[in-house]
């Protein structure tokens, strides 16, 4: 593995970890709200959340490229705060990764909070627990498997994301050139052996994360048993 490949690997891992770190609090807030709300507009919110997974990466990438551009309020605000840019920068592909992976993080969390049931919440209230205390001591531990599932899915998906990252970030070495883009560059150069090695590495990291999740879930299930 060349030095450029190592840089791309570190960038991909850092992007995946930063994306998961941003998504976890969003998954808790949105997931719990979706899990307990009886609002009639919830199906619309859920449809909007799942939309990033349904749109082609080129369509979503184009929308983000326009929305994060230097002439947009968000782009101008970011430039005023940091002096940098969103598009063709790490901050841009980080925001894009958050949006793309939001349904992967929120949907398992919503299912987990929905599975707790109102009866348990009412029992906690009858025992004198405040809603905040019941959330921290009862709901969050019970919903943690769903949150962990969403985190692993978002981590693995971020590692392999190609289209949106390419459109929003380009392929700037050391800044936006992730491992998936390095694989594409190897294929373009007809270096199929090098592309295969990088692809196996990427698949191995993602598989390892998923296997670890299942092992932790099995161990937790044995403790409960």
Image (spheres, grey):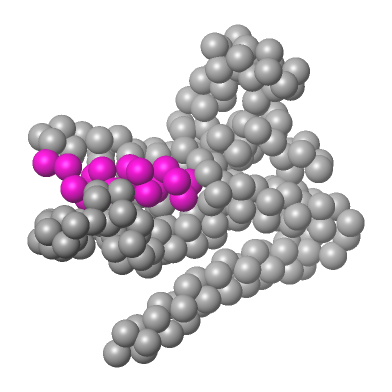
Question: Compared with residue 30, is residue 61 higher up or lower down, i.e. above or below?
Answer: above
In the image, residue 31 lies in the stretch drawn in magenta: yes
> Where residue 97 appears, x then y in whole percent?
54, 42
Q: Residue 82 lies in what quarter of the image?
A: top right
Q: Residue 118 lies in what quarter of the image?
A: bottom left
Residue visible at 76% across and 39% down in the picture: 175
> Where residue 106 appears, x then y in whole percent?
36, 49
Task: Return the residue nearer the eye: 219 or 9.
Answer: 219
Residue visible at 17% across and 42% down in the picture: 37
Left or right: residue 207 compared with residue 192: left
Q: Which residues are magenta?
A: 23-38
Q: State which quarter of the image contains the N terminus.
A: bottom right
Task: Return the residue nearer the eye: 65 or 91.
Answer: 91
Left or right: residue 139 compared with residue 39: right
- In this view of the protein, can residue 190 be seen by the observer? no
Q: Main secondary structure of the magenta part?
A: helix
Q: Residue 13 lies in what quarter of the image?
A: bottom right
Residue visible at 81% across and 41% down in the picture: 173
Task: Return the residue nearer the eye: 185 or 33.
Answer: 33
């Amino acid at each position: 593995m060349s030095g450029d490949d190592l840089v791309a690997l570190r960038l991909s891992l850092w992007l995946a970890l930063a994306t998961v770190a941003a998504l976890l609090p969003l998954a808790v807030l949105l997931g719990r709200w979706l899990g307990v709300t009886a609002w009639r507009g919830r199906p619309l919110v859920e449809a909007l959340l799942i939309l990033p997974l349904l749109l082609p990466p080129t369509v979503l990438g184009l929308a983000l490229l326009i929305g994060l551009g230097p002439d947009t309020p968000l782009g101008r605000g970011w430039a005023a705060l940091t002096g940098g840019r969103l598009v063709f920068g790490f901050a841009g592909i980080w925001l894009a990764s958050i949006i793309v992976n939001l349904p992967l993080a929120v949907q398992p969390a919503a299912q987990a909070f929905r599975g707790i049931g109102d009866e348990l919440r009412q029992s906690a209230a009858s025992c004198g627990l405040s809603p905040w205390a019941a959330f921290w001591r009862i709901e969050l531990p019970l919903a943690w498997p769903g949150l962990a599932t969403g985190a692993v899915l978002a981590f693995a998906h971020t590692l392999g994301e190609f289209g949106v990252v390419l459109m929003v970030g380009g392929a700037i070495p050391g800044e936006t050139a992730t491992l998936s883009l390095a694989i594409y560059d190897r294929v373009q150069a007809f270096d199929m052996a090098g592309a295969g090695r990088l692809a196996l590495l990427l698949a191995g990291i993602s598989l390892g994360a998923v296997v670890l999740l299942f092992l932790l879930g099995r161990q937790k299930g044995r403790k409960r048993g």
